[in-house]
Image: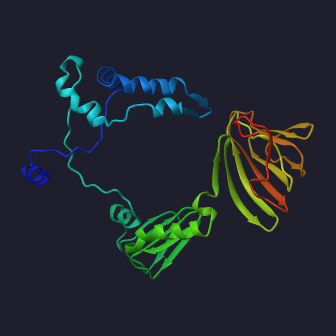
């Protein structure tokens, strides 16, 4: 049947892409799927605001009937003229790719005369038909053909273009070796902003910390490490033991081991600091939280 449809050229393929005003969609849902609409509204109304996030109520959303947009609304519009809503199909003739692998991306993007697709700080010599992405440093490629090189702050991938689907084998190997790269990036986002682990070595670690305006880290303490903070941009309110300090650009402070401390951004621009940790253990689990705006204490 599908072959008949395609060969007749009288049918269009449903891409699953729909566009409408929210008000029109709510009107259709209220008439055609009131149970789904009620469940969604209940999940939203009984949810909670979590700073930048809106957390819907899990129980209410789980109780919502399950259906696709096609069956729930679109296929029913033809018999509901009283709604005053019509569904229009717009034909589109275009290529399609899921871009599910690096070689598929190479086929889509623009390339130089030698067939190299490059992005970032890349130097290519006597190479052709390669995909080379550089995010954080210079990448030089010499005498290569049909390769993929992807450099990020976390890791570097080098593979034949026709073998990039096997990257899943690399992930499986990393999981088996319990490598942190499987689940964590160098740049880690938190409710208050993010930190980027710039450097690390024996008994030290350096982080770039950015705190959003009006946000603050928890009131905390570390058993095994001390911290040095240098303000790069913005104004920091620092709690250090019984002291409360205000630090501006180029000013710094020292947080001794087992000292309660907190970093706050009371300003209108992002606060950026460089944190130098030193001590016998620098793991993220060496944190005792006494008070936290995000429920982690």
Q: Residue at x 72, y 63 (%)?
A: 199
Residue 111 is drawn in which quadrant? bottom left
Could one spot residue 119 in this view of the protein?
yes
Q: Who's the residue at 36% across and 58% down the image?
A: 99
Up/down of 147 relative to 280, above or below: below
For the question of whether residue 153 can be seen, the reply is no
Q: In front: 238, or 296?
A: 296
Tally the numbered discs. Answer: 0
In this view of the protein, which residue sits in the foreground, 281 or 201?
Answer: 281
> Picture coordinates of residue 56 (x, y %)?
53, 31
Q: Residue at x 8, y 52 (%)?
A: 4
What residue do we see at 42% from left, 78% from top?
127
By what rule are the colours in the image chosen?
A: rainbow
Left or right, residue 64 beside residue 9 = right
Quarter that holds the C terminus: top right
In the picture as drawn, the residue positioned furthest to the left comes out as 8
- Residue 35, x across and y down, in percent: 37, 24
Note whether 131 is above or below 252 in the view shown: below
**Residue pushed farthest right?**
242
Q: Is residue 269 left or right of residue 98?
A: right
Identify whether 87 is placed above or below 151: above
Query: In terms of depth relative to the viewer, which is nearer, 285 or 219?
Result: 285
Residue 115 placed where, x, y %?
A: 35, 72
- Image location of residue 16, percent across then percent down: 29, 42
């Amino acid at each position: 049947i599908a072959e008949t449809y395609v060969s007749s050229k009288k049918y269009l393929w449903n891409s699953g892409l729909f566009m409408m005003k929210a008000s029109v969609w709510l009107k259709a849902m209220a008439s055609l799927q009131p149970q789904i609409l009620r469940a969604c509204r209940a999940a939203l109304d009984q949810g909670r605001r979590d700073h930048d996030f809106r957390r819907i109520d899990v129980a209410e959303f789980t109780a919502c009937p399950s259906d696709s947009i096609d069956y729930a609304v679109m296929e029913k519009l033809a018999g509901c003229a009283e709604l005053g809503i019509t569904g229009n199909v717009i034909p589109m003739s275009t290529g399609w790719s899921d871009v599910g692998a690096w070689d598929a991306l190479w086929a889509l993007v623009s390339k130089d005369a030698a067939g190299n697709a490059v992005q970032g700080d890349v130097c290519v010599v006597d190479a052709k038909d390669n995909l080379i992405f550089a995010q954080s440093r210079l990448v030089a490629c010499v005498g290569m053909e049909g390769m993929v090189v992807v450099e990020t702050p976390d890791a570097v991938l080098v593979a034949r273009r026709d073998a990039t689907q096997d990257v899943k084998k690399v992930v499986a190997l990393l999981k088996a070796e319990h490598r942190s790269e499987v689940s964590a990036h160098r740049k880690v986002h938190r409710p208050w902003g993010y930190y980027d682990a710039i450097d690390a070595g024996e008994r030290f670690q350096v982080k770039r910390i950015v705190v959003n305006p009006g946000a603050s880290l928890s009131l905390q303490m570390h058993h095994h490490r001390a911290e040095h903070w240098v303000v790069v941009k913005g104004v920091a309110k620092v709690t250090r033991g019984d002291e409360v300090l205000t630090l501006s650009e180029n000013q710094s402070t020292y947080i001794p081991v087992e000292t309660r401390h907190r970093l706050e951004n009371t300003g209108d621009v992002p606060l950026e600091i460089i944190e130098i940790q030193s001590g016998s253990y620098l793991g993220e689990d060496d944190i005792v939280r006494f008070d936290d705006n995000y429920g982690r204490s």
